[in-house]
Image (tube, rainbow, N blue to C red):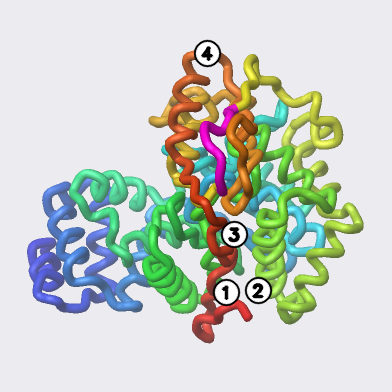
């Protein structure tokens, strides 16, 4: 078998066989197939696309290219969730403890933030002492004992994806729907869970800027799941404004805890509960209405917050901070951003808000950058709110004056004002499952 023939076949619109796809993935991962031939195939896929069967084969070949997590020692249906990335998106810190409190084991591997989006690992590490790096046996033992573990990706998980993503990033082939779907799902499948709920964001703060793009990606990923025997559901959720009021690591943990206490922002609570309900549904806990009721009860009873505290303690964290926020790290500076005009806050460039948070120190612009866990933004006004000139729009937390000036400038540029309030937006736009696409009633 020759790589030349595989490139030629796909360039001509042919459907690659599982053997051909496996030959490519194995050869590229081992270094036997050079970058220039892999680039040629990626470009052919970009223009010619892939069938559902091809995309599923590519996903599984990538998942098998390295370590695969065996969760069979954990009783029951194991559930996972994945977000395509957003600003203020701390739903894992709510949905995962809710699911675990309802008896569904959650063995989740999460990433760090990069660019304008935050990472769950960074948020958790704002809890003093909490460790997200652990070996496989400790990870499994914690899920068996606590029912919940959220850790950083460990071992050699889907190395083919890492190599291919780096190549796509420099060859203008990132935005190919089959390649995006295979990249995400290969890591989720290698992580071993039986049921996967996907939160596909759309809007100014998401990688999928339009609902149509988000739906296309969701359908690709659900189809992959069905083709490889996993239970998968995707929710299309709005990211045209940050989720909740807080952007930044410790700030977001505190806001997640407020939701687990039964309060917190309505938008964050609604999306998190719907994700949790879908995790419970895929795990066989009942139909969606019953699972929503289970999720609400897990919060109202305090069991979900207790589960988060148990997880934090098991991972070496000082769980007292989840009861007493004064024990979280404190920013050196806290300054308000004041409105320079009156009117209604009509829109927010969510990506720019995320960038403002990075400038304050809450995120990283490149891998290896240090993160200030106390830095970030608390939005005091969100789209639809009336604002008077001189009124506080937000509180910015950072370590130095220079960062404050940069963050303030970027944040103000992200806001659009109008004389009339904007039309309300739907938070959950669609649900994509094995039976098709459903719209909210």
What residue is pinned by disc 2?
282
Q: Residue at x 29, y 44 (%)?
A: 166
Total numbered labels: 4
Question: Dot 3 surroundings within 10 Å: few (below 14), some, or many (20 or more)?
Answer: many
The tag earlier along the polypeptide, 2 or 4, is 2
What residue is pinned by disc 1?
231
- Quarter of the rendering containing residue 72: bottom right
Q: Which residues are magenta?
A: 337-344
Q: Nearer the viewer, mark 2 or mark 4?
A: 4
What residue is pinned by disc 3?
81
Mark 4 and mark 1: Cα distance apart in space: 49 Å
The tag earlier along the polypeptide, 4 or 1, is 1
The tag earlier along the polypeptide, 3 or 2, is 3
Mark 1 and mark 3: Cα distance apart in space: 12 Å
| Callout 1–callout 3 Cβ contact below 8 Å | no
| Callout 4–callout 1 Cβ contact below 8 Å | no
Compared with residue 354, is residue 274 higher up or lower down, i.e. above or below?
A: below
Question: Dot 1 surroundings within 10 Å: few (below 14), some, or many (20 or more)?
Answer: many
Compared with residue 437, is residue 41 higher up or lower down, i.e. above or below?
A: above
- The quarter in which the N terminus is drawn is bottom left
């Amino acid at each position: 078998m020759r790589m030349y023939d595989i490139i030629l076949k796909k360039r001509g619109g042919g459907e690659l066989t599982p053997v051909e796809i496996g030959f490519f993935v194995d050869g590229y991962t081992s270094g036997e197939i050079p970058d220039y031939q892999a680039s040629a195939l990626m470009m052919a896929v970009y223009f010619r696309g892939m069938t559902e069967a091809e995309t599923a084969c590519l996903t599984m070949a990538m998942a098998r290219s390295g370590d695969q997590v065996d969760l069979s020692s954990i009783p029951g249906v194991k559930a996972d969730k994945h977000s395509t990335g957003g600003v203020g998106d701390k739903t894992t810190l709510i949905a995962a403890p809710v699911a675990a409190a309802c008896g569904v084991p959650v063995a989740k591997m999460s990433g760090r933030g990069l660019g304008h989006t935050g990472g769950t690992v960074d948020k958790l590490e704002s809890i003093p002492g909490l460790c997200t790096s652990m070996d496989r046996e400790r990870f499994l033992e914690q899920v068996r004992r606590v029912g919940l573990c959220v850790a950083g990706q460990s071992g050699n998980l889907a190395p083919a994806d890492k190599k291919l993503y780096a190549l796509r990033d420099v060859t203008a082939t990132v935005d190919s729907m089959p390649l995006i779907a295979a990249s995400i799902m290969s890591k989720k499948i290698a992580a071993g869970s039986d049921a996967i709920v996907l939160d596909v964001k759309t809007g100014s703060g998401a990688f999928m800027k339009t609902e149509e793009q988000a739906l296309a990606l969701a359908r690709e990923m659900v189809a992959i799941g069905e083709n490889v025997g996993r239970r998968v559901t995707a929710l299309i959720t709005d990211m045209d404004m940050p989720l909740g009021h807080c952007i930044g690591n410790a700030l977001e943990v505190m806001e997640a805890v407020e939701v687990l206490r039964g309060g917190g922002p309505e938008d964050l609570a609604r999306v998190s509960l719907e994700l949790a309900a879908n995790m419970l549904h895929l795990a066989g806990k009942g139909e969606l209405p019953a699972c929503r009721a289970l999720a609400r009860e897990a919060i109202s009873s305090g069991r979900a917050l207790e589960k988060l505290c148990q997880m934090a303690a098991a991972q070496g964290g000082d769980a007292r901070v989840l009861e007493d926020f004064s024990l979280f790290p404190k920013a050196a500076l806290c300054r308000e951003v004041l409105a320079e005009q009156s009117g209604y806050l009509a829109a927010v460039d969510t990506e720019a808000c995320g960038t403002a948070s990075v400038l304050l120190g809450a995120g990283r612009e490149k891998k290896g950058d240090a993160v200030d866990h106390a830095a970030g933004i608390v939005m005091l006004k969100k789209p639809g709110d009336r604002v008077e000139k001189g009124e506080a729009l937000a509180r910015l937390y950072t370590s130095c004056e220079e960062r404050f000036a940069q963050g303030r400038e970027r944040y103000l540029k992200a806001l659009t004002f109008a004389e009339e309030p904007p039309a309300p937006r739907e938070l959950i736009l669609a649900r994509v499952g094995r039976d098709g696409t459903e719209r909210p009633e």
